[in-house]
Amino acid sequence: MIKKNATLLMIFICFALVLSACGQKPAAQSLSEPQNASAGKSTAASEPKKETKLDEIKKKGKIVVGTSADYPPYEFHKEIDKKDGIVGFDIEIAKALAKDLGVQLEIKDMKFDGLLAALDAGNVDFVMSGMTPTEERQKNVDFTKIYYTAVQSVVVRSEDKDKIKSIDDLKGKKVGAQKGATQEKIVKEQMPASELKALGKISDLMLELKNKKIDALVVEVPVATAYLSKNQDLALTDMKLQNEDSGSAIAVKKGSPELVDALNKSLDKLLADKTIDKLVAEANDLVE
Ligand code: ARG
């Protein structure tokens, strides 16, 4: 009986030894094959490495940015050498990002409220449009770090500057904001006694204000200053608004962490050496 048990135990030990030797075999093999070619191939076959968005962009040699070019000094139309072009510091930053990736930049101009849908549909690879990374937007898209921050302001007709000095003075009046922009929410929440008029393009809102179709317009200070430099009949008020949503970041479709990382790395560089400050100043000079 004891002998039988001992034999069984021996058989079991032998089995275990054989099994463990089998388990070690691939490791021993890869040691003798420094390039590990066969092992690499077999993992690639069983689990093909998915091409990332970043790989795809580099392969195409082109990255497409979506923007709403109604937003000087961020992005705006300007005639250069008798040809219409899109300029601004967002555009210059986008060019620098494309250069770091080693690809060409293509610009697609559209209404601000269509940008995230274009991103979702894959019509653009990223959105750069003075866009604030709000909590709500973060549910649907990823953002890089903030590369620029501005403060909100209220613009009125110069002739009304002495009459419209507070949110209270806007009671019952029409206040404009860009459709789909954070300014729309600011009017709704901080000026509940005013009537919101939301339009797709800031340039149209400025016209509405000049033509007395609206009485005030909520817009970020750098943009207000840019438009005012060409419109003596418009003026900036001293009204202070709550500004918890501010700052511009780049939006990327969810699920491309490699692209977000690459863009953040470039932004870090442009922020650290103050290139962005320089591009903002140059864009302001272009506003004329
Ligand atoms: N920062 C605001 C937002 O994210 C307004 C941006 C408007 N940008 C533009 N290019 N028109 O909603």
Image: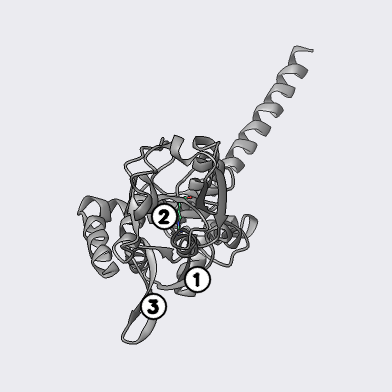
Up-down: is 222 above or below 167?
Answer: below
Respond yes or no on whether mark 2 lies under 8 Å from ligand 1: yes
Up-down: is 220 above or below 281?
Answer: above
- x 36%, y 61%: residue: 74
Q: Position of residue 66 (x, y in %)?
A: 49, 65
Mark 3 neighbour class, 10 Å CA radius: few under 14, some 14 to 19, many 20 or more = few
Mark 1 neighbour class, 10 Å CA radius: few under 14, some 14 to 19, many 20 or more = some
Q: Would you name the residue on which mark 1 appears? A: 108
Q: Earlier in the sequence, mark 2 or mark 3?
A: 3
Up-down: is 30 above or below 188?
Answer: below
Mark 2 neighbour class, 10 Å CA radius: few under 14, some 14 to 19, many 20 or more = many
Residue 231, disc: none
Q: Earlier in the sequence, mark 1 or mark 3?
A: 3
| Type of the residue with mark 1 | Lys
Q: Earlier in the sequence, mark 1 or mark 2?
A: 1
Residue 130, disc: 2
- x 29%, y 67%: residue: 287
In the visual, does 1 lie left or right of 241?
right
SS at circle 1: strand
Q: Would you name the residue on which mark 3 appears? A: 85
Residue situated in front as seen by the camera: 252 or 1: 252
| Type of the residue with mark 3 | Gly
Q: Position of residue 279 (x, y in %)?
A: 25, 62
SS at circle 2: loop
- Farthest residue, direction right: 1
Circle 1 or circle 3, nearest the eye: 3
Q: CA distance from mark 2 to mark 3?
A: 18 Å
Image quadrant containing the C terminus: bottom left
Q: Position of residue 268 (x, y in %)?
A: 29, 51
- x 54%, y 64%: residue: 111
Q: CA distance from mark 1 to mark 3?
A: 12 Å
